[in-house]
Image: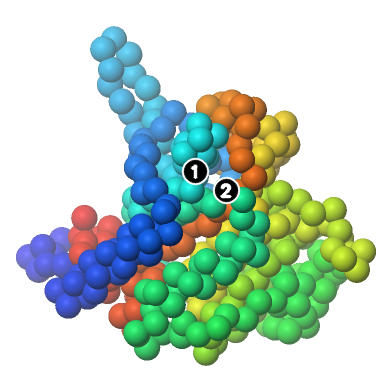
Amino acid sequence: MSGGDWRPTASVETLRLRARLLAAVRAFFAERGVLEVETPCLGAAAVTDPHLQSLATCLAAVGSQRTLYLQTSPEYAMKRLLAAGSGPIYQLARAFRDGETGRRHNPEFTLLEWYRPGFDHHRLMDEVEELLAATLGGSAAPAGAAERITYAEAFRRHAAIDPFAEPAERLAETARRGAAGAVPDLGEDRDSWLDLLMGTAVTPALGRGRPTFVYDFPASQAALARLRESDPEGGPAVAERFELFIEGMELANGFHELTDRAEQHRRFERDLARRRARGLPEPPVDDRLLAALGSGLPDCAGVALGFDRLVMLAAGAAAIDQVLAFPIDRA
């Protein structure tokens, strides 16, 4: 620690830009009648996704101690509000993810997350595009008409493979051939190879000059999205999920939300089995979310958008530290 560490890493000009974008987001949703909500950062349950690691803390109550988790996303609590009849909602939430540091990552960050009853993922992509125009339209960042391509097409264009058909061995060969350095041995885990290729070969080429939505992910990567049994041409089952990329950076992740309690429980258990196999902590499942799904979650679509990355695009910043007052190294 040095004597200069007290200073913010973002300029005052950038902090003013950040404040204007926060105001623009709130105005955007107010105009559309979407309710702003707040949900707890701390919860009794945590995300089970093997790719996300939660930060835990200990609450010392009278005569006992409880482990609580800082939320990686407000999703579970917001879905409980939807099931209780909230209607369309959004939140500018503080989120926390262990082990995520780097040029585009800070362990504590801001997520803009919203849910639209009656929307599917295609209609929600329309609204995300409208939000980009409202927030980035006057900046140097590309915010014109977005490109929309399927996950399969993205891989065909930028990795020259069919992600639904190639065996793990072929995916590994493709990853090693294009790698600048050592590539881990991921065995027969196709999804891990696809994630690696997505990050190294596909994502850097997306959103160049205009935003790119990638949709219809493999069913095995559904997360909390519903599945569609097959596409109109009789292809493999796909997840009704999309991701948004601008200038080679992922900005948002959206879903036509799963509403089936039993299927959600199966996915939680599958995630925990994967965590067990990898030697990762197994957090408690969110039983309150499952109960909310059981009571009836309305048909809806939802999306989480990295607000700090949105500020990066508006400011022309190369690193997330440039748009945060105090990143983790100065917290």
Name the residue: 43% across, 63% down.
Answer: 306
Amino acid beneath label 1? Gly
* Residue 6 quadrant: bottom left
Where residue 165 appears, as percent x and y from the top left, is: 87, 67
Q: Which residue is mark 2?
A: 117
Tell me: 97 left or right of 50.
left
Image disc number at residue 322: none
In this orientation, which residue lies closer to the viewer: 170 or 316? Answer: 316
Residue furthest to the right in view is 234
Helix, strand, or loop for circle 1?
Answer: loop
- Asked if residue 321 can be seen in this view, the reply is no
Locate the C terminus and report the quarter of the image it occupies. Answer: bottom left
Residue furthest to the top in view is 63
Mark 1 or mark 2, which has the lower sequence index? 1
Name the residue: 39% across, 48% down.
Answer: 35
Helix, strand, or loop for circle 2?
Answer: strand
Where residue 26 appears, as percent x and y from the top left, is: 33, 60
Position of residue 267 relative to residue 305, above or below, is: above
